[in-house]
Amino acid sequence: MKIGKLTDYGVLVLNHLARTGVNLQSTEEIATATGIPLPTARKVMRTLVDAGLVLARRGAKGGYRLGRSPAQIPLLAIVEAFEGKLTLTECSSTESDCEITEQCSLAGNWVGINQVLGMVLAGISLNDIRHPAGLQRLADSFKSSNEHIHLVSID
Amino acid sequence: MKIGKLTDYGVLVLNHLARTGVNLQSTEEIATATGIPLPTARKVMRTLVDAGLVLARRGAKGGYRLGRSPAQIPLLAIVEAFEGKLTLTECSSTESDCEITEQCSLAGNWVGINQVLGMVLAGISLNDIRHPAGLQRLADSFKSSNEHIHLVSID
DNA sequence: TGAAAGAATACCAAATTAGTATCCATTCTG
DNA sequence: CAGAATGGATACTAATTTGGTATTCTTTCA
């Protein structure tokens, strides 16, 4: 259960763009600043632009900048930009190629889990990623809400 | 962001063992019941046993059964049995092969995210996976705690 | 008009993961 | 005690996914 390298790269780029603000950054600047290989950086940028997280300006003096404020960029959006809709298993994806779906009574049960995970990732913003302090408090807040979950789940 | 097929198989097997209870199930029985290819099922069983989630009895009339009650088997344990400690990125794993760690100021910031995700998965039991109703209520409970997170996170 | 950017497409390489085969160790039963 | 039925361990192969690269086209500014 990992995110892809490209997704990770995406976060690095977004972090860099959050720091440089409104100043347009060329692919080359981004590549050197983040350590991402140049051709790969191109691919990353295209994905980010397609997802609407980053704005591009073409031509000479062109470049990239964030499409919204870091607080309004959820981790979920970044992950789904690179890896498609969040589904932990094949079963839960729409075009399930899973051959044993017949006998697998669990097929539908993953939906809820995906929802929960999605909500968690939706609650983490680029800002949270950039500021460890906020993350720590975020983790702590979960520790308490987790007890809540245990009360609710069926045993 | 998916779980591996083997992990998914693991859940299928655990589900089957939860249904069959104390009756020892042979690898072959498990394979036919779940639709998992026999040789692959062997591999899955070994992993589950190593993780302590399943008990094995060798020799004739041997087989497998759950090591604990379904309510005491968290999804986190299943995932980590097959995929190792939960780390979304290379950076956050202990032996980070990530070459750009120097320039990557985000290296440490994933720790908190991993923690949060780990807590969520720890809060979901095999029982929750088997009973969709419980999952739905679980998802709902998160919707409210998510607002809590937004209050806590830094914008 | 040419240089400096991004956009699009297609392709290749490498790493991971799934799947298989083989041989060994244990335990029950007659 | 022997043999059959089972799980354990190891090593190998194949397939898929993912990351990375190259090439060509389009847009915009000076």
Image: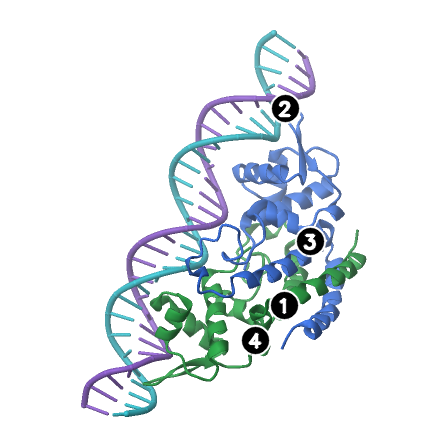
Chain colours: A green, B blue, C purple, D cyan
Mark 2 neighbour density, 10 Å: few (under 14) some (14–19) many (20 or more): few
**Distance of label 1 from label 3 (alpha carbons):** 23 Å
Residue at image position (37%, 66%) is A40
Query: Which is nearer the eye, B41 or A26?
Result: A26
Chain letter for mark 3, please: B
Dot 4 or dot 1, earlier in sequence: 4
Residue B59: image tag: 2
Q: Secondary structure at mark 1?
A: helix
Tell me, for residue A71, which label it has, or none: none
User: Which quadrant of the structure image shows residue B109?
Assistant: bottom right
Give the labeled residue for mark 4.
A73
Of discs 2 and 3, which sits in the foreground? Answer: 3
State whether discs 4 and 1 lie on one chain.
yes
At 72% from the left and 73% from the top, the residue drawn is B147
Distance CA(mark 4)–CA(mark 1):
18 Å
Compared to residue B74, the image places residue A37 above or below, namely: below
Q: What is the spatial separation of the Cα atoms under label 4 and label 3, in whole angstroms?
A: 26 Å
Give the spatial CA distance, label 2 vs label 4.
56 Å
Q: Identity of the amino acid at label 4?
A: Ile
Q: Tag on residue B122?
A: 3
* Element type at mark 4: loop
Quadrant of the image occupied by residue D29: bottom left
The residue carrying mark 1 is A133
Q: Amino acid at mark 2?
A: Gly
**Res D21 quadrant in image:** bottom left
